[in-house]
Image (spheres, rainbow, N blue to C red):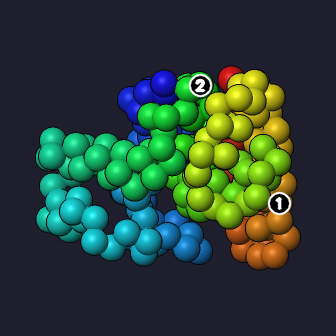
Amino acid sequence: MANFDPAFEKMIRNEGGYKLINVASDRGGQTYAGIARNYHPNWAGWRYIDANDLTNLQLSNLVGSFYKTEFWDKLSGDAITRQITAESLFDFAVNAGVKTALKLAQITLGTVPDGSLGPVTLGKLNEMEESVFVLKFALAKVARYAEICNKDREQSKFLLGWINRTIRGLA
């Protein structure tokens, strides 16, 4: 079974670590450790950030539990048998949302893309050879990123970062 801790360590590096950022035209707005205030305004860690208490040890615990609950558990990460498969799905879910990640994975697996991880999707995910899934999924992610940029040229400034993130997941 896949393990959350190594998946989290890779993902948090992709998110830039434990930094507070605010990038113009990023739809998520102010972001800490990849957690976007616009999408997660009720996250408990904002109280530490608003108090400028970024060194509080509780903050890093809140980050880890947030990603475990909001992404890993919703993807049934513990039920995925292959670590790299789980890491690839988890990282993309953090970047694009759980439902989007699941739909793209389902397209990759040849199942109905409903955005839910049921027994059919989980079974196919666990049956498909890991290297085949990860490569096909990476190509699907790049195609999706290109589609985003074609629809909204303002998002093009993120394209290289998204592609680099996808490539790092192949190593």
In the picture of the structure, the residue carrying the numbered disc 2 is 82
Quadrant holding the C terminus: top right
Residue 27 rendering spot, x and y as whole percentages: 55, 73
Q: Can you say whether 94 is above or below 128 in the image?
A: below
Residues at badges 1 and 2 in contact (C-beta under 8 Å)?
no
SS at mark 2? loop
Q: Position of residue 2 (x, y in %)?
A: 49, 27
Q: Residue at x 15, y 55 (%)?
A: 53
Q: Residue type at mark 2: give it.
A: Arg
**Image position of 128 with respect to 92: above or below:** above
Q: Is residue 7 left or right of residue 5?
A: right
Residue 134 is marked as: none
Residue 25 x %, y %: 59, 74
**Identity of the residue drawn at 59% across and 58% down:** 116
**Residue at (71% x, 29% y) in the render:** 127
Which of the pair 42/86 is nearer the observer? 86
Residue nearest the viewer, comparing 137 with 2: 2
Kind of element beneath mark 1: helix
Which residue is labeled 1 in the image? 146
Residue 61's spot in the image, x, y percent?
A: 22, 43
3D distance between C-alphas at marks 1 and 2: 28 Å
Counting residues from the N terminus, which is met first, the one under dot 1 or under dot 2? 2
What amino acid does circle 1 point to? Ala
Q: Badge 2, how many Cα within 10 Å: few under 14, some, many 20+?
A: some
